[in-house]
Image (spheres, rainbow, N blue to C red):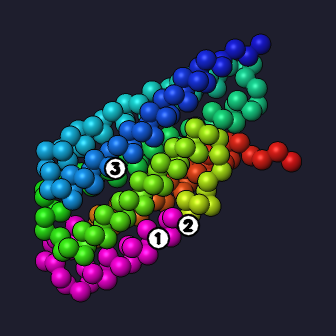
Amino acid sequence: MYSGMSDDVNIDFRMTQLFALVYEALAGATDALLGNDSARGLMVVEGDQSVDELTAEVELMVWKQIEDEARPSAALRHLVGVLLIVPELERSGDLAEHIAQRAVTNLGSKMTPLSRGIIQRMAEVALEMWRDAADAYGDRAAKAQALSEADEEIDILHERLTREIAAESMPTAIGAQVTLLARFYERLGDHAVNLARRIEMLHPPLA
């Protein structure tokens, strides 16, 4: 008889921790960037190791559970879904680290006021999306549509920032780094949408 319920709970607990770590890294990286706080940016960069270590721990736990031949198909589906979700979380942690690296170089202080405002709004939307994605995992809820709509706002903001950079209102080297920043936030939004879609697949609606 299958008796791995406590292990499933432990996996879900660590997944919740992973969502929280990525959210905190994104929030911290943004605050460091816009607050010209290189020390805090460095803390976020160094903290990315915690995401990597927890990711490896979750994957190991999942594979051990998959080896349980008595596992029900529904539980196996959930475990496979977790394996698909974990890389999205790890890559998102890396993106937050990349933002923090720009904070370490005080990029925020070299940006135009408009570009700073756009980045701040992109971060606000991305953080809300990540909060919703974490809630969706915890509540087993379907939120992909809502996150897709929020992701459209990030895309629009990305276009606005691209126009600001093209206007040559910043030195070329700074504009290039801001272009990367915009891409990082855009990718964070994409990952949040992908996560929501995978979470919905974990628990398909009953016929």
Where is 89 relative to 194, above or below?
above
Q: CA distance from mark 2 to mark 1?
A: 7 Å
The residue beneath circle 3 is 26
Mark 3 element type = helix
Q: CA distance from mark 3 to mark 2?
A: 20 Å
Mark 1 element type = helix
Pick the quarter of the image with the N terminus.
top right
Of the residues under marks 3 and 2, which one precedes in the sequence? 3
- The question of residue 155 being in magenta is answered with yes
Mark 1 burial class by Cα count in 10 Å: few <14, some 14-19, many 20+: some
Mark 2 burial class by Cα count in 10 Å: few <14, some 14-19, many 20+: few
Q: Nearer the viewer, residue 142 or 61?
A: 142
Q: Main secondary structure of the magenta part?
A: helix
Name which residue lies at 62% across and 40% down: 139
The residue beneath circle 1 is 153
Residue 97 visible in the shown view: no
Q: Position of residue 16 (x, y in %)?
A: 49, 34
Quadrant in the picture for residue 149: bottom right
Q: CA distance from mark 3 to mark 1?
A: 18 Å
Q: Are marks 2 and 1 in contact (CB under 8 Å)?
A: yes
Left or right? Give the position of 27 relative to 5: left
Amino acid at pointer 3: Leu
Name which residue lies at 14% across and 51% down: 37
Which stretch is magenta? 149-178
Q: Position of residue 203 (x, y in %)?
A: 71, 42
* The disc label shown at residue 149, or none: 2
Q: Position of residue 49 (x, y in %)?
A: 30, 35
Name which residue lies at 27% across and 81% down: 164
Left or right? Give the position of 56 relative to 84: left
* The disc label shown at residue 86, or none: none
Amino acid at pointer 1: Glu
Residue 131 visible in the shown view: yes
